[in-house]
Amino acid sequence: REQPVILSIESSCDDTSAAVLKGAQVLSNIVATQQIHQAYGGVVPELASRAHQQHIVPLVHQALATANIDKKSLSAIAFTRGPGLLGSLLVGTSFAKSLALSLDIPLIEVNHMEAHILAHFIEREGYTPPPFPFLAATISGGHTQIVRVDGPFQMEVLGETLDDAIGEAFDKSAKLIGFPYPGGPLIDKHAQAGDPLRFEFPIPKVDGLNFSFSGLKTSILYFIQKQQEKDAGFVERERDHICASIQHTIVKILMQKLEKAVAETGLKHIAIGGGVAANSGIRGALKEAEEKQGWTTYVPPMEYCTDNAAMIGIVGYFKYLENRFCGLDVSAKARYSI
Ligand code: KG4
Ligand code: ZN
């Protein structure tokens, strides 16, 4: 039968995005990143929802125009129902509902965390999706999760962060050494020139496959304060080594948990998603695990790792095939587990 054409909308945090998919293929995927939060050193929920409101209509027009699709030929609308910031989710949810109502087509609600994982199934040149069952690690500024994936809608969260997300650990550490928000990429850049073993930060002891990153931030803060008291030029002079040591610690925390997940499940196919997948230390450690431990790792192109509507669209496609539609009375859910 004819492949469905699905318009998808993502507005869970600080990126507004609209995409059009035909089957599992992306015809367009447009993202408007909100710059306004930079000045505040973090996402301001009130400003985020206002910016979503400003962006959403032009973005949807742009996504349809780029895909060369008339809205009258859409088969369904998919949108992020949660988890995320409630005010932000409400913008995408109400827009999707109104459009589905006016076009009289089905509406599909999508869990953002499932979408990060199913993004691996977006069709692209020369790609191989991970075979079920596999492990997924979603690592970003908002999430840190290890999930067992037995099928598109058979997922089980094995572990997640109890406090800060891994991206927040990068960003908050970066702030302590004077980098602007979001400082994760800057830590990565400076780490390339530093010695990862120069300074040692503690690895938190957390049960099972859960994570905790807030203690790391505190120990870095105390370490820097102590060193600066003795020598005001410390951070300036040792910046690259501090970055390399922080990155080394964060990578170690992640890899230890992934190794534990592999040992407990016997699964060696690991799919990575989220913006922190860009980190060179993590990529290096995964490559090493492929060579030394026989893992197969999967990282989609960065445009499908960071928050985007194409990943919402691929879940929409899978649900469309099973007629898993929702009613117009559906409401956004700030807390919405897999
Ligand atoms: O998925 P994402 O774009 O957005 C949200 O979580 O909303 O992830 C952004 C996060 C930020 O914390 C950013 O600092 C981090 O990913 N990040 C990195 C790198 N690139 C992005 N962290 C470390 N190294 C990088 N190269
Ligand atoms: Zn996300």
Image (cartoon, rainbow, N blue to C red):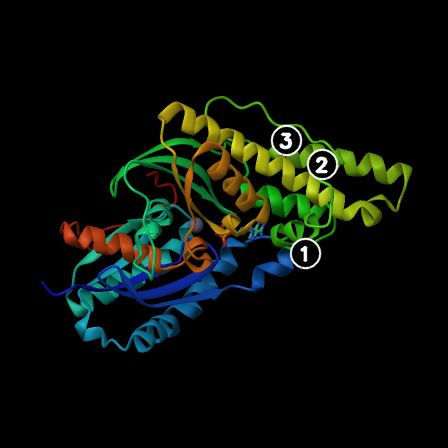
Work out whether mark 3 precedes mark 1 in sequence or the reverse, and give the earlier one. Answer: 1
Q: Is mark 3 on a helix, strand or loop?
A: helix
The residue lying at 42 percent from left, 36 percent from top is 295
Q: Mark 2 vs mark 1: which is more N-terminal?
A: 1
Q: Is mark 2 within 8 Å of ligand 1?
A: no
- Check disc 2 and give the amino acid type: Ile
State how far apart marks 3 and 2 are (Cα): 9 Å
Q: Earlier in the sequence, mark 3 or mark 2?
A: 3
Residue ID for mark 3: 215
* Residue 167 picture quarter: top right
Q: How far apart are marks 3 and 1 (CA)?
A: 21 Å
Q: Is residue 228 left or right of residue 244?
A: right
* Mark 3 residue crowding within 10 angstroms, few (<14) / some (14–19) / many (20+): some
Residue 334: x %, y % from top left: 39, 45
169 relative position to 125: left or right: right
Q: Looking at the picture, which amino acid does disc 3 mark?
A: Gly
Q: Is mark 1 on a helix, strand or loop?
A: loop
List the residue tagged with mark 1.
180
Mark 2, residue position: 220
Secondary structure found at label 2: helix
Q: Is residue 310 left or right of residue 103?
A: right
Q: Could you classify mark 2 by the number of other residues whose Cα lies within 10 Å: few (under 14), some (14-19), or many (20 or more)?
A: many
Q: Quadrant of the C terminus?
A: top left
Q: Gap in Å between the C-alphas at discs 2 and 1?
A: 17 Å
Task: Decide if ligand 1 comes within 8 Å of the CB at mark 1.
Answer: no
Q: Position of residue 64 (x, y in %)?
A: 30, 74
